[in-house]
Image (cartoon, helix red, strand yellow):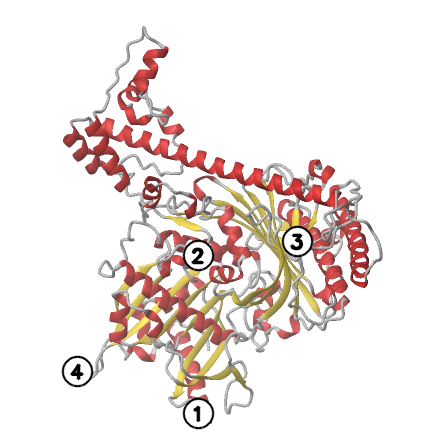
Amino acid sequence: MSFGGFLDNSSGGGGARIVADIPYSNNMPTGAIAQPRLVSPSLAKNMFNSPGLSLALQQPNIDNQGDGTRMGENFEGSVGRRSREEEHESRSGSDNMDGGSGDDQDAADNPPRKKRYHRHTPQQIQELEALFKECPHPDEKQRLELSKRLCLETRQVKFWFQNRRTQMKTQLERHENSLLRQENDKLRAENMSIRDAMRNPICTNCGGPAIIGDISLEEQHLRIENARLKDELDRVCALAGKFLGRPISALATSIAPPMPNSSLELGVGSNGFGGLSTVPTTLPLGPDFGGGITNALPVAPPNRATTGVTGLDRSVERSMFLELALAAMDELVKMAQTDEPLWIRSLEGGREILNHDEYLRTFTPCIGMKPGGFVTEASRETGVVIINSLALVETLMDSTRWAEMFPCMIARTSTTDVISSGMGGTRNGALQLMHAELQVLSPLVPVREVNFLRFCKQHAEGVWAVVDVSIDTIRETSGAPTFVNCRRLPSGCVVQDMPNGYSKVTWVEHAEYEESQVHQLYRPLLSSGMGFGAQRWVATLQRQCECLAILMSSTVPTRDHTAITASGRRSMLKLAQRMTDNFCAGVCASTLHKWNKLNNAGDVDEDVRVMTRKSVDDPGEPPGIVLSAATSVWLPVSPQRLFDFLRDERLRSEWDILSNGGPMQEMAHIAKGQDHGNCVSLLRASAMNANQSSMLILQETCIDAAGSLVVYAPVDIPAMHVVMNGGDSAYVALLPSGFAIVPDGPGSRGPTSNGHVNGNGGGGGGGSQRVGGSLLTVAFQILVNSLPTAKLTVESVETVNNLISCTVQKIKAALQCES
């Protein structure tokens, strides 16, 4: 995963902002990490013109032992809990934002009462203000030193800083409200001027009232376009009325010719179309989701860069997209909240299974009937994630950040068209066309290419939903050729904010795919929804967010190598990220990387896929001919046991030829999660003789409920010294190898005695029943020739094939598996 601004030492861009000021503890229970949170910025940096405000906003929170209060949080609870006596003792002349002192005002209001006030001297206030500009959150040591220097009590200093931060917060809120009021007044005035101009058209030549005379050819075309837009608006209003449950009439007046930067608005809620602004839209969401849904969808103008499609066809297609998005959102929300009889809890593993008969009775297929030869997979998973709803929505709606959050699942993705960018600067109502290549790390499972709509909607305060649905049916209707091996039925997630920056995520995955292209070994895994299903999405999201939270924590985990600087950790993580991305690309052969598949490559096993590509002018790879070979096998051991065996540097000599027959030593360790298996390590192999220098191996391991990964690559020692000191990791050449481990799926018992795969759940008689195991993918990338112009030889291919076979046999022997 890319850690965005964290790894690049920048925070610009407007995405989610990570607040990391709570120390991380290894003793915290899983799923309850009360530390860094992912939040979205609420104010732009250029909004604050006061130097004092800027200084206060840019200071980190280092008050881990004192008040622990963060600027921008609500201090009313902590202040309210203080006793009256403590409150009086803490007051000072600078606490009043209007300039008056607290004791003078109280004395004027209540003369008879005697209260204990401690007015700070101008010198004390000057000292306090100076420290506040440098550090708004002083720790206990700083407060003690300051109290001694100013002859104040520590409690007085503490309360002064609390009140000063509260005052700063109030000033920020006033400033924000003032800006919003100004913007609102500006928009209202602009709206009124446009309405007046439309009521009283003025001739541009003479300045008098416009009089309709001879109609030019251009104006005739504009009137025809205006009539067409009216018809389209009527259709859209009818569509909106369908989801509102009541009819909505179109505008009575004609629509002016569209301006280049104008937008058509689908008014399903508040939108400025007169009476439509008061129409409520309510969709029951159950007790967890609060109130109803208010829909308002601004639609971006058509993309003029699109060729081969007329304006009329483009408009009709977009209207179909709007209708499909609303229907998909409705289906997703209902599938996320409905339990039995739509979802049935299975006896094996307790996972939820979709009742297809009930589904067909409840929903009308929004993308048509299932194609012949396709099978259905459906899954639902709920989990708690260390990220708030706004940050997660921003990640899902940005194709680059979406791919970085799910690096092992998304081989490639892009946003092909933005129909609506959302409302009011948020993602509410955002609708866009996307293309993605989804993968399971195995050469036996084809990459799923899908073209789909992604629609985002805010259902209530702190409750969002993001839905995907394939558009292949619409493209077939418009005559565009489509060749798909997978269709994405309404799928996505409903996100609900929880306390302390966490979110409750309910994920639904529903797809139809061509099963004949999937190897027998992986069919049980995919049909159960564990390959591309909701469990894998939620597990990956939890692991990635936990990784970000730990990496941004102010406390370094105890297992980490303390000699590595903060910049060195970032460089190592970027290098490990690039290594893992290249490994996944070599296993699944995404179109992002120019791999050429070798069909007749000599004496190569049937289930081994061999690919080759030329590496030229890439500083991150050695130049020459790169050969990638990958295969998947079934092993009768649990995924956890297999993962622990492969990641243990002490047992590496039992399968790795790079270990020189001896154990390896861990030189550096960077934790990426609470589980010790989520980390980046630097290993050193023992030299075989005194004349041979030792070799370093960079290794990244990760594990979650859906599977695990072990990726490694030999690296140059001088280059790693540069990286560990914070140098640029982009120039470190490496070729990754490794393993991907997943459960073999419910109902799978591995190969039977006759060599076929038993996919009937172990219900067959005789000796065909076996215990559940793991599906292990082994992949190597090797430089077979340092000249990019050289030709690949059969001997090189057979050498790599023998390396894979030998490695698999050594793993089986070490784990005492049957051959």
Q: Nearer the viewer, mark 2 or mark 3?
A: 3
Query: According to the image, label 2 marks what residue?
Result: 544
Q: Is residue 356 visible?
A: no
Residue assigned mark 3: 262
Residue marked by disc 4: 690
Q: x%, y% of residue 564?
A: 25, 61
Q: Are marks 1 and 4 in contact (CB under 8 Å)?
A: no
Q: Where 552 sits versus 523, above or below?
A: above
Q: Residues within 10 Å of mark 1 (few under 14, many from 20)?
A: few
Looking at the rendered structure, the kind of residue marked 2 is Gln
Q: Pointer 1: what residue?
A: 789
Secondary structure under the numbered disc 4 in the rendered image: loop
Q: CA distance from mark 1 to mark 3?
A: 54 Å
Residue 96 is situated, as x and y percent measured from the top left of the image, at 34, 25
303 or 406: which is nearer to us? 303
Q: Are marks 2 and 3 in contact (CB under 8 Å)?
A: no
Find residue 764 and report its image quarter.
bottom right
- Is 252 on the left-hand or right-hand side of 161? right
Q: CA distance from mark 1 to mark 4?
A: 37 Å
Q: Answer above or below: position of 218 versus 238.
A: below
Q: Is residue 269 left or right of residue 77?
A: right
Label 4 Cα neighbours within 10 Å, binned few <14 / some 14-19 / many ≥20: few
Q: Residue furthest front?
A: 206
Q: CA distance from mark 2 to mark 4?
A: 42 Å
**Callout 2–callout 4 Cβ contact below 8 Å:** no
Residue 447 sits in quarter: bottom right
Among numbered discs 1 and 4, the one appearing first in the sequence = 4
CA gap, disc 2 and disc 1: 40 Å
